[in-house]
Amino acid sequence: MVAGEVQKGARIADIGSDHAYLPIHLVKEGIINFAIAGEVAKGPLSNSEFEIKDQNVQDSVIPRLGDGLDVIQDQDQIDTIVIAGMGGILIQSILDRNQGKLKNVKRLVLQPNVGELELRTWLQNNNFKIVNEKIVAEDRHIYEMIVAEPGNASYSDAELHFGPYLSAERNTAYLSKWERELKRLLKVENAMKNSNSHDSNRLKQVQEEVSRVQEMLSK
């Protein structure tokens, strides 16, 4: 799903690449011929180094140790950044901390495990427009992806929460995610109501979220 959003000929930085499976796949499929496989820890970096050598793509995929976008150098001419398998708030902080590295970037391919609202809000506030979203269920997990490009956009509260593309498509994985989330919120609401020491402000927030999800699902 992520690979499908990397455009042919892109020069990518895969942040948190681990085994470098994504850039290796893209090179071997002839989609790209240059990638940085970035890792913040030496253990995962060694995994990347092994796989890159094992698949004989050393000339095309460069493993590099560094924190977030620090692995990108000007001479790399990176135009696509992939950050997959992290929380949305962490992805947001990685992008926010090193915005100078984004000046020549044409596409962000982001796969947040949680925190999609915060990530969409950051994109809106930092001159990135969402150009595609996808959601898929596999092995009881639901994976959500946001693709963004430079540009201005203004999203409604509902679009920030549920995704402008995902809420329009409303596929099975999307509905399953929000039905599951509604059940969780209702349990939280019930537990707080039955507690003598619940935070009234927090209860109000939960109830507002319940109403928001119920309204979306009822459409």
Image: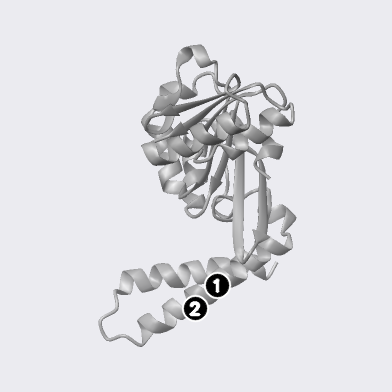
The residue nearer to you, when weighing 2 against 44, is 44
- What residue do we see at 69% from left, 21% from top? 9
Identify the coloring.
one colour
Give the labeled residue for mark 1: 182
Pointer 1: residues within 10 angstroms few (<14), some, or many (20+)?
some
Which residue type does callout 1 highlight? Answer: Leu
Which quadrant would the N terminus be assigned to in this image?
top right
Give the labeled residue for mark 2: 186
Q: Is residue 41 visible?
A: no
Q: Residue furthest top?
A: 75
Question: Is residue 169 positioned above or below 146 on the image?
Answer: below
| Disc on res. 101 | none
Q: Secondary structure at mark 2?
A: helix
The residue nearer to you, when weighing 45 against 167, is 45
Pointer 2: residues within 10 angstroms few (<14), some, or many (20+)?
some
Q: In the figure, residue 191 lies in which quadrant?
A: bottom left
- What residue do we see at 29% from left, 78% from top? 198
Query: Distance between the Cα atoms at labels 1 and 2?
Result: 6 Å
Residue 40 locus on image (x, y percent): 38, 36
Question: Is residue 80 positioned above or below 59 on the image?
Answer: below
Q: Residue furthest front?
A: 54
Whether the residues at callouts 1 and 2 have beta carbons within 8 Å, the answer is: yes
- What residue do we see at 41% from left, 36% from top? 94
Which residue type does callout 2 highlight? Answer: Leu
Question: Is residue 110 positioned above or below 198 on the image?
Answer: above
